[in-house]
């Protein structure tokens, strides 16, 4: 009996998750099937998608894939394993130990056949609005899916600085996650989905400049906006930040106006939908505050 190769589209997952899944999927499978991980933008013939249920970009890529393959089943990853419209869900902490069993269940349930156009590598007709058997979505559409709120990683050893930055960002409509050390920053960036990183240039151990360089070297995180925080702002400091690839610079403690202006500027660089897209995710411009 020939071994079937099943392509699995990875839809804009966090860098570390994507790398681990590529390795894990290459090793999974048995006599009947093997799995091959492909990035979503190269996944015309994918039979399964893996998405981050909390990532707007990941869900947008899934929607794009379903334009060519309306019945494409998805595995939704989230922190608690409960988020997402698919009944195939997985907690982030159990990703590697649970993916094999979940894939086996999904395949046993029966994979929808690829549309003829997808098999031929050409665009398929528009997706059907019929409810699919593997979906837990209501039969009647309930309107647009809520967009994931904006989230920033705030890394500074000084608690007073972290609290002040978190308060200022909250008033801009941006949630925050705190970190106090370089290893914690690296772990959160690798595993999380952040829209912005505020990074103390003088962080103990690996300083902010080197952490910024590491983020910008990684192809999976290089588009993540990084703002360096420093108690001074000399031409030398600006040059170091520019060489590290940072997107912005703030002097501590920043005024609320300065924090808001820098956050808006760097978020707009990444936003594919402009300021309107940011507002839909809860961002408050100066006019809305």
Image (cartoon, rainbow, N blue to C red):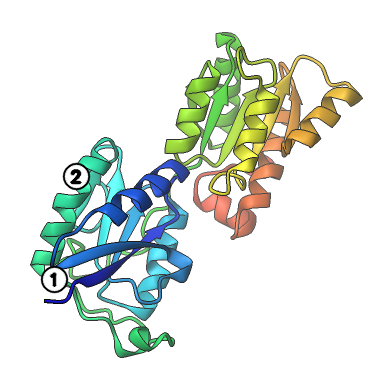
Q: Position of residue 127 (x, y in %)?
A: 33, 81
Q: Residues within 10 Å of mark 1 (few under 14, many from 20)?
A: few
Q: Position of residue 203 (x, y in %)?
A: 63, 16
- The residue lying toward the viewer, choosing from 106 and 142, is 106
Q: Residue at x 15, y 60 (%)?
A: 30
- The residue lying toward the viewer, choosing from 117 and 83, is 117
Q: Residue at x 19, y 44 (%)?
A: 98
Mark 2 sits on what residue?
98
Q: Residue at x 38, y 78 (%)?
A: 67
- The residue lying toward the viewer, choosing from 117 and 82, is 117
35 with respect to 1 (left or right)? right
Q: Position of residue 188 (x, y in %)?
A: 46, 31
Q: Earlier in the sequence, mark 1 or mark 2?
A: 2
Residue 253 in sight here: yes
Q: Dots 1 and 2: beta carbons under 8 Å?
A: no
213 with respect to 102 (left or right)? right
Q: Which corner quadrant holds the C terminus?
A: top right
Toward which corner of the image does residue 156 lie, by quadrant?
A: top right
Mark 1 sits on what residue?
133
Measured along the vertical axis of the image, is residue 130 above or below residue 147?
below
Q: Residue at x 19, y 72 (%)?
A: 3
278 with respect to 116 (left or right)? right
- The residue lying toward the viewer, choosing from 94 and 168, is 94
């Amino acid at each position: 009996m020939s071994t079937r190769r099943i392509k699995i589209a990875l839809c804009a997952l966090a860098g570390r998750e994507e790398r681990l899944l590529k390795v894990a999927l290459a090793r999974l499978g048995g006599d009947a099937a093997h799995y091959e991980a492909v990035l979503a933008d190269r996944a015309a013939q994918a039979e399964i998608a893996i998405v981050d249920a909390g990532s707007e970009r990941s869900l947008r890529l899934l929607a794009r894939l379903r334009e060519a393959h309306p019945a494409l089943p998805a595995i939704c990853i989230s922190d608690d394993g409960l988020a997402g419209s698919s009944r195939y869900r997985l907690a982030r902490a159990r990703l590697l130990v649970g993916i094999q069993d979940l894939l086996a269940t999904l395949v046993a349930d029966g994979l929808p056949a690829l549309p003829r156009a997808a098999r031929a590598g050409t665009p398929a007709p528009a997706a059907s609005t019929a409810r699919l058997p593997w979906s837990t979505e209501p039969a009647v559409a309930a309107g647009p899916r809520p967009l994931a709120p904006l989230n920033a990683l705030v890394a500074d050893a000084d608690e007073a600085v972290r609290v002040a930055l978190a308060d200022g960002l909250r008033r801009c409509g941006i949630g925050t996650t705190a970190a106090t050390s370089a290893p914690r920053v690296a772990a959160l960036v690798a595993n999380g989905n952040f829209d912005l990183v505020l990074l103390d240039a003088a962080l103990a151990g690996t300083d902010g400049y080197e952490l910024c360089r590491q983020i910008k070297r990684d192809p999976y995180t290089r588009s993540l906006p990084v703002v360096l925080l420093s108690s001074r702002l000399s031409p030398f400091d600006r040059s170091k930040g520019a060489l590290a690839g940072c997107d912005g610079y703030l002097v501590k403690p920043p005024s609320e106006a300065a924090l808001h202006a820098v956050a808006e500027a760097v978020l707009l660089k990444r936003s594919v939908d402009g300021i309107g897209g940011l507002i839909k995710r809860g961002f408050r411009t100066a006019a809305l505050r």
